[in-house]
Image: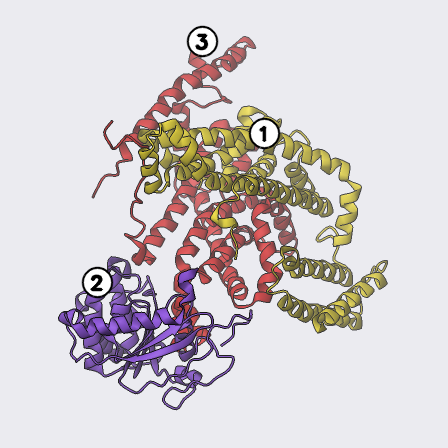
Chain colours: A purple, B red, C yellow
Amino acid sequence: MVFPNGTVALKEANLEVAPGEFISLIGPSGCGKTTLLRLLADLIQPTSGQIRIGGKSPEEARKSRAYGYVFQAPTLMEWRTVLANVMLPLEIMGFPGPERRARAEKMLALVGLEKFARHYPWQLSGGMQQRVSIARALAFDPQLLFMDEPFGALDEITRENLNLELLRLWRETGKTIVFVTHSIPEAVFLSTRIVVMTPRPGKIETVIPVDLPQPRTFETRETTRFFELATAVREALRKGHGYEVAE
Amino acid sequence: MRISPNLLPMLVVALVVLALYWPIMYLVNIPVAQRALDTGAALPCQTAFECASQLRSPVLPSPQQLWGGFVSLMFPLDSPNAIPLNAAVTALETLVGLLLATLVGLFFAVGIVASRAFERALLPWIVASQTVPIIAIAPMLVVVLGQYGVQGWIPKAIIAAYIAFFPITIGIAKGLQSPDPLALDLMKTYNAGSWQTYLKLRFPASVPYLFTAFKVAMTAALIGAIVAEISTISFQGIGKMLAENSRASDVVAMWVIMLASAALGIFLVAMVGWLERLLTPWRRAQVAPRPKARVAGREVGA
Amino acid sequence: MKGWSLLVMGFALQIAFIVRWWKEVEVAPLGLRLLIALGVLLLGVGLARVAAQFAHARNPLLGFTPAALTLLALLVTAEALLRAYQVPPGLVPTPTRVVATLHGVRDVLLQDAYQTVLKEALVGYLIGCSLGVLTAFLVSRYLFLERGFLPYATLFSSIPIVALAPVLVKMVGIDWPSKAAICAITVYFPVVVNTFRGLTEVSPMSLDLMRSYAASEVQQYRWLRLPNALPFIFNALKLGTTLAMIGAIVGEFFGANGQGLGFRIQIEAGRFGFDIVWAAIIVASAVGIAWYGLVAWVERRLTGWHVSFRNG
């Protein structure tokens, strides 16, 4: 992946994701993890290389609405109520009226915000807004969910709660999730596999499988295995750009 | 209903201004009255002080005169020479002009947002027009339109539209470009067509910008309509009243019409604000009182 | 470079027609009119292509090229069409005629501009701006004034100045001070409102910082509120240039002592001297843009640190 101005954003990125997996892409800023996700989502196009999503190219996958995308920011439409925001993709994709409503209500219940259906986004906290945006991504029931640092702007406590909730959603819906983060505990806690990426040019350093038992709880974070895995990720990150320390 | 904390101070200021007006009025009118008495003009009063509040061409009209003028110009409500009917005509011209400007502005704004070439070719001129007294074109435009048989209230509305067009176009274009790039990406992940992106994202996002532009454009359009009315033969409108009374040197009437036009301008802009609150319910509390940073020491209770 | 060749062909066609029809007094035959239409088409397509080439130009001068070409194309087309259909100059004068008039009556227009701009608009502008900034300082300092006076200042911006003009002309007289008064009043209120916002919309953290330095109120204004207000003040000053020009011109519609751009426009529009009207409008526009540009230049010098000047 080379940007028009010649910057090489991603060099070696070979990765295969199986259905039902929870994959985290972790790395420092500028390692190309967001770029990789945007490539998968066909928001940008690769200069070389190949991406297949369930046998389709990213463009075909996007056009057949195969995935939901959750951005760093909630990007809710401020003129729509919470319910109407969740219905937005359904309107665009031409779902019939009654079904739109039923689905949106179900999704809001799934993220525990059914009481806020009539509220406007500004009346919700940042964490609640991000939950709405997750409900919106799930509303049209895509098999695949791309999440780009969705909890990056939230405080640690909210983030841990939402991590737990996301895992519950993942278990209940059986989606495949590709999750970008720069938090080591978050990656370890959520993922079935962690893809460690390093910068300049961005490449995949290593892939670490996470064998923590499911379902994971608050206590999972306090187990020895959790710390071991976190240490493994940290070391992989350090190895990838040791020169960074000298800077 | 909560009473605004501004109300009392505003009343006090209004009273102070009124209290100052009275002596100032006498101060500037007495010399004029004295001169009139000296030249032996037939006046229904003996002393300069008495006459100061009854002059036909006062420097500042007295409150009694203003009130008298107000009553005679307001009633009967449907008289062709009274303010209500004329103000309604001018308001209609302004509003039709605004509507017209919005339609044309929408077209141009979409062009500017959709095509970089269009933007490069036209936007600089639309922006430059904001720094130019475009009102200067009104007297000519109204005469030219008259030559082509466009008469009555329509040319005034066209001029109002012409004046309002530039701020409205810029406002809508800004609004259409206001969505977050992430929101545009979101629409792309839904594989939304460009028409859907306009309908669901760009148009709603531009509504607040449209209203902001309306507030500026409304006053400008009103000025345009009035200037158009005075620049040609008009049978109705605030501009016609202004021109007539200006020619007749009826100072009191001019004051009353000035106050009435001020009220009309404030009313029209207030209508925009009201419509804005009605149509953008999601912003109602968002634009609530901003946190005020006051002068240090005050709230510390020094 | 295909857009350029289309553009050149379009211009050539229009100019050739204009030269050919320079002295004719009849409506051009259908064939020639079709040629003009072809020229318009070429210009349109050429402009679109050329503008697309410049779409991502960084240099402001290059970025402006398509706009300049558009104006040029519009002028040439207007000239050609007006000549082809023999539109009487009493209705719409051709651009060349306007330019000739502009040159012909330049002494008169310069005097008009001197009266309108340097006496009326500039004097009113300076008075209105300085009073406005002064008032804003007072209003920002005293809560009572903020509550009692500021709402009126906001209301005043929605008042049509035309209604003010006849009264002030009657009161102050037909000479230039009455128009200066109109300009001062129209400029005053936006300056008050904007300056006030700049003085008070200071980040609470900066205020805390000032407090931690035990800064006096004067120091607080000097080091925090005034710099913070500068971008706001300049916005009002820029807006004020346009308002002052409008105020002076509209004011002259209601009475002037035989001089002034507004007076000229009013008089000549009434007697169908539209070439002079256009010439006066060009002068007014040029002055308006130049004045605005001057204030914007000063702003750049003084507030170069502000976000709005950071790019890329």
Image location of residue C103, percent across then percent down: 78, 43
Image location of residue C79, percent across then percent down: 75, 59
**Residue A158: mark:** 2
Image location of residue C95, percent across then percent down: 74, 53
> In the image, what residue type sits under mark 1?
Val
Q: Measuring 76% from the left and 39% from the top, which residue is drawn there?
A: C106
Label 2 sits on a secondary structure element that is: helix
The reply to whether the C-beta atoms of the residues labelled 2 and 3 are less than 8 Å apart is no
Q: Residue furthest bottom?
A: A55
In front of the other: label 2 or label 3? 2
The reply to whether the C-beta atoms of the residues labelled 2 and 1 are less than 8 Å apart is no
Q: Measuring 43% from the left and 47% from the top, which residue is drawn there?
A: B88
Image location of residue C180, percent across then percent down: 57, 30
Q: Nearer the viewer, residue C24 or C140?
A: C140
- Residue C5 located left or right of residue A208: right
Do the residues indicated by labels 3 and 1 lie within the same chain of the protein? no
Q: Nearer the viewer, residue A222 or B248?
A: A222
The numbered mark 2 sits on a residue in which chain? A
Q: Measuring 36% from the left and 86% from the top, which residue is drawn there?
A: A16
In front of the other: label 2 or label 1? 2
**Residue A161: mark:** none
- List the residue tagged with mark 1: C123
- List the residue tagged with mark 3: B47
- CA distance for labels 2 and 1: 60 Å
Label 1 sits on a secondary structure element that is: helix
In front of the other: label 3 or label 1? 1
